[in-house]
Image: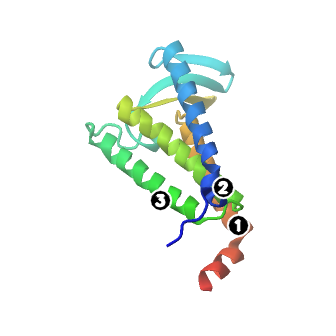
Amino acid sequence: MMSKPVLSTGLRWLWLVLVVIAIDFVSKQWIMNNLMLHESMPVMPFFNFFYAHNYGAAFSFLADKGGWQRWFFAGIAVAIVVVLLVMMYRSKASDRLNNIAYALIVGGALGNLFDRAYHGFVVDFIDFTIGDWHFATFNIADCGICIGAALIVLEGFINPTSKRSEHKG
């Protein structure tokens, strides 16, 4: 089996993974160095930096389960990263929207994976409020994952028939 040049595959977009990881890491370091745990720093009337530790997954899912979830979520992140890297390798570099989406998700998953492995929790700090309503606190890695997932859904709406015809032949 012959391998194809990496730059002709979706792996050409790995630079975006590194950008997400770098921005996520730097922002989390800034928060940890400048705020105390549970301290809030107002940025705008509806937006704060709020330093929090998340021991669970999205919206603190399973955060109070005694520690086993750290390795469970780390395992899920590794599996997702491997699957998406394989998908990027199998896709063409010109498949921009999907590869950008995969790269954002991989970068976000690796950013949060680093936190879980190194700290035992994920550092969250982006905090939105409107009046008494409060959205779950999140981070740059989470933004990459959510934007990537939204791009995958968007791509499904943009090219629904081309994907079906590719799988028939």
Q: Residue furthest front?
A: 2
Would residue 149 be seen by someone viewing this image from the given angle? no
Residue 42 at what x, y percent from top left? 63, 18
In front: label 3 or label 2 = 3
Q: Which mark is residue 167?
A: none
Q: Nearer the viewer, residue 111 or 37?
A: 111
Q: Which residue is located at x 62 percent, y 37 percent?
A: 19
Residue at which label 2 appears: 151
Is residue 37 depicted above or below 1 in this figure?
above
What label sits on residue 83 in the rendered view?
Answer: 3
In this view, 50 is above or below 116: above
As helix, strand or loop, the secondary structure at mark 3 comes to: helix
* Label 1 – label 2 distance at C-alpha: 10 Å
The earlier-in-sequence mark between 1 and 3 is: 3
In terms of image quadrants, where is residue 92? bottom right
Callout 1 amino acid: Phe
Left/right of residue 83 with respect to residue 7 in the rendered view: left
Residue at image coords 53%, 33%: 137
The amino acid pointed to by label 3 is Val
The image's mark for residue 157 is 1
Looking at the rendered image, the quarter that the C terminus falls into is bottom right
Calculate the distance from the C-alpha at mark 1 to the C-alpha at mark 3. 22 Å
Quadrant of res 68: top left
Is there a contact, CB below 8 Å, between mark 3 and mark 2?
A: no
Q: Do the residues bearing badges 1 and 2 touch, measured as CB atoms within 8 Å? A: no
Mark 1: which secondary structure? Answer: helix
- For the residue labelled by badge 2, is the local secondary structure a helix, a strand or a loop? helix
Looking at the image, the residue that sits furthest to the bottom is 169
Taking the spot 43% from the left edge, 40% from the top edge, the residue there is 113
